[in-house]
Image: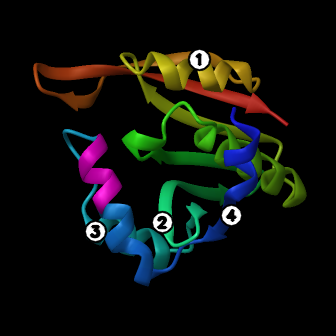
Amino acid sequence: MNPEFSERVALELLQEKDLAAVMHIEKCCYSFPWSQGVFADCLRSGYDLLGAWDNSRLLGYAVLRQVLDEIHLLNLCVAPHCRGQGVARILLRSLMQGARENGAVVVSLEVRASNVAARALYRSEGFMDIALRPDYYPDARGREDGHIMECHL
């Protein structure tokens, strides 16, 4: 992680006005991106959308939902040109700290089997594989397995 870069990253809860920037990253990163309507529905339904900013430029975001004492991380995405600089780790650590402060005891997520970098990041932050969801994600060749991971806080 580049310390100089990480010092410039500011974390803020996203609002509807930020969704165009979210969509730009989402469409760059996923073959099957969420729609802007899905993100807007998440906001309206009380999900937290956390953004990592460098001045006025969105670098990445996370979508999470707390239900009782569990946080479910639905989406964590970093702009391609910002990868490898610690943005995902900053977002993940921040949401986990917020989860602890809000009384959560576990954070869970699903991640594509092919997303080796994300799975390594999650493991390095204490997540463990707990199950496999066969054919969970759409893929250019059909479907792809999803790894269910969780971290006890």
Residue at which label 4 appears: 10
Label 4: state its secondary structure: strand
Q: CA distance from mark 3 to mark 1?
A: 29 Å
Looking at the image, is 19 positioned above or below residue 117? Answer: below
Who's the residue at 62% across and 24% down the image? 121
Label 3: state its secondary structure: helix
Instruction: Specify the amino acid type for callout 3.
Output: Gln
**Circle 4: is it few (<14), some (14-19), or many (20+) Cα within 10 Å?**
some
In percent of width and height, residue 66 lies at 67, 58
Q: CA distance from mark 1 to mark 4?
A: 24 Å
Q: CA distance from mark 1 to mark 2?
A: 26 Å
Say whether residue 69 is magenta: no
Q: CA distance from mark 3 to mark 4?
A: 23 Å
In percent of width and height, residue 109 lies at 55, 36
Which mark sits nearer the N-terminus, 1 or 4?
4
**Residue that sits furthest to the left in the current view:** 141
Label 1: state its secondary structure: helix
Residue 57 numbered tag? 2
Residue at which label 1 appears: 120
Instruction: Specify the amino acid type for callout 4.
Output: Ala
Q: Nearer the viewer, residue 101 or 115?
A: 115
Looking at the image, is 40 positioned above or below residue 72? Answer: below
In percent of width and height, residue 6 lies at 71, 47
**Quadrant holding the N terminus:** top right
Q: CA distance from mark 2 to mark 3?
A: 18 Å
Say whether residue 28 is magenta: yes
Quarter of the rendering containing residue 54: bottom right
Q: Main secondary structure of the magenta part?
A: helix
Residue at which label 3 appears: 36
Residue range in magenta is 24-29
Q: Nearer the viewer, residue 73 or 56?
A: 56
